[in-house]
Image (cartoon, coloured by chain):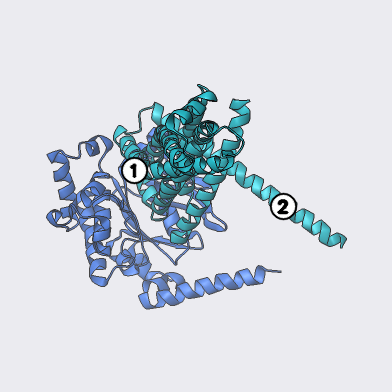
Amino acid sequence: MIEYIDVHKAFDVPVLSGVSLTVGTRETLSIVGPSGTGKSVLLKTTNGLLAPDLGDVRIDGVSVYHSSRDTLSAIRRKVGYVFQYAALFDSMNVFENVCTGLPDGEAKRARSTEVLRKVCDALEDVNLDPALVLHKLPSELSGGMRKRVGLARAIVGRPEILLYDEPVTGLDPVNTATISRLVLEIRERTHVTSIVVTHDIEQALEISDRVALLTHGKLRFVGTPAEFRASDDPVVRAFADRRAAAEAALQLVEGEDEEETEEEP
Amino acid sequence: MKTLARRTVVGLLAHIGRTAETVARHAGEMTLLTWRVAAATVTGRVALRDVLGQLHSIGVGSIPLVAVTAVLSGVVTSQQGGYQFTSSIPLYVLGSVVTSSVVLELGPVMTSFVLIGRVGARITAELGTMKVSEQIDALHSLGRDPVSVLAAPRIIAGTIATPLLVGLADGIGVFAGLVAARFAVGLGPDSFLYGARLYWHSWDLLYSISKGLVFGFIIPLISVHMGFGTRGGAEGVGRATTAAVVFMIITVLVLDATFPPLFLN
């Protein structure tokens, strides 16, 4: 179980303003919302990539921010993270990249047959042919393949929690559908707890047990896809309708700009 | 007029304050980085394979450029010295001038400049790119410590390789000066070596190697620090690399200026 407790985070301006949320074990939760509302920042507080200014995040009751370095390492081993642009290591080939997702002891035995099998299994799990990609560098892969290698690296260590940061951003519709299907398949097969940050509301409603809408650094809605579709909240309704989503996001941003203008002396 | 003067003074004080704050911040962060590298090394979290790889890249890879620089330094010092000494000063003194110039100053400083351009800039650009493409975050999320994996091997290798390169540059520079003296001013090797021995102190080489040790530590330390602090995409990487090179050159020159009063007087 993941608990976000009154999480605040500001850079030059406040990004998260008191987010409290609980994600149950084996649940898949999608976080949607306009750009710049702190979705990725919230995700990065889950495994300590960003420390909140105030509040806490707990995983299975253990605080991410009030624990020892060893405990944080143990938490990170439980959590797989799929980065927006895959964040593959440029100088390593696909095999070496996926190997880094294994626990330290196993990764050091990179030449063993068992490690090779695990890496190949992870690549097959994300619909990549190990024979074709194993020795390629990230720069030799397409955007969709890079995302899938990033996913393979995240799942090869069999994590209990998977965090997806914009898994379909920049992908064509075919690759978007492929990644969505993979998220579902991985959930079915490994029963992981998943949090998906996405702009794609259709993907969010398709793959999630619950959907959270984040606006202006606060949660505006948390509920099932059915509740999301049936919500009376005009912003939620706008997001449920994909075409209207862009308009709503634009209005939100414009409203924010107007508020800022009015506040100026 | 008074207002203008007051504004100028306030502006100057503000600039000094900002510069002092920046220097203090960098100094604090680099002290912390040094501590973390030391802790990672002492606790055995730095892989020997990574250190050897960096030793090859920083040390062996720099030999040709260091050798060329040392040859040119020795030749130019010998020719210019010979040009000045031909009338009144005994020509064998040229041996001492070349040896002292190369060993006490040119060997360590020119080698450091080569390493700043060839190694320091590369480290900052490499780590900066990793930072902006979330590869450093990926290391964190995989439970690996970037200080142990990236920083420590580079700093350890720099600290080991640079004194050796300085020793090599000293030898090559003096030999090149000896050969150049023969052809430029007709000073034979015996006379050159007689002059060199005449004013030679046993600790001169130790002094030179000590400079190499200090510069060899500070160059990768600054470049790693600047790389880890990179923000803002490709432009940010360019900015960080330029700033790192300037920072390294100034630091090496300032440290170089502290050596004579500390160790020669």
Q: Which mark is residue A51?
A: none
Residue A167 appears at what percent x and percent y?
Answer: 31, 61
Residue B61, numbered circle: 1
Q: Which chain letter matches label 1? A: B
Chain B colour in the picture = cyan
| Residue shown at the point (50%, 24%) measured from the top left | B197
User: Is B231 or B123 nearer to us in this picture?
Assistant: B123
Where, quadrant-wise, is the C terminus of chain A in this rendering?
Answer: bottom right
Q: Secondary structure at mark 1?
A: helix
Local crowd at mark 2 within 10 Å, few (<14), some, or many (≥20)? Answer: few
Q: Tell me whether the residue at label 1 lies in contact with that at label 2, contact meaning CB atoms closer than 8 angstroms.
A: no
- Which numbered dot is residue B14? 2
Q: Position of residue B219 (x, y in %)?
A: 48, 41
Instruction: Tell me, by letter, which chain the rendering colours blue.
Output: A
Which quadrant would the N terminus of chain A be assigned to in this image?
top left
Compared with residue B148, is residue A168 higher up or lower down, i.e. above or below?
Answer: below
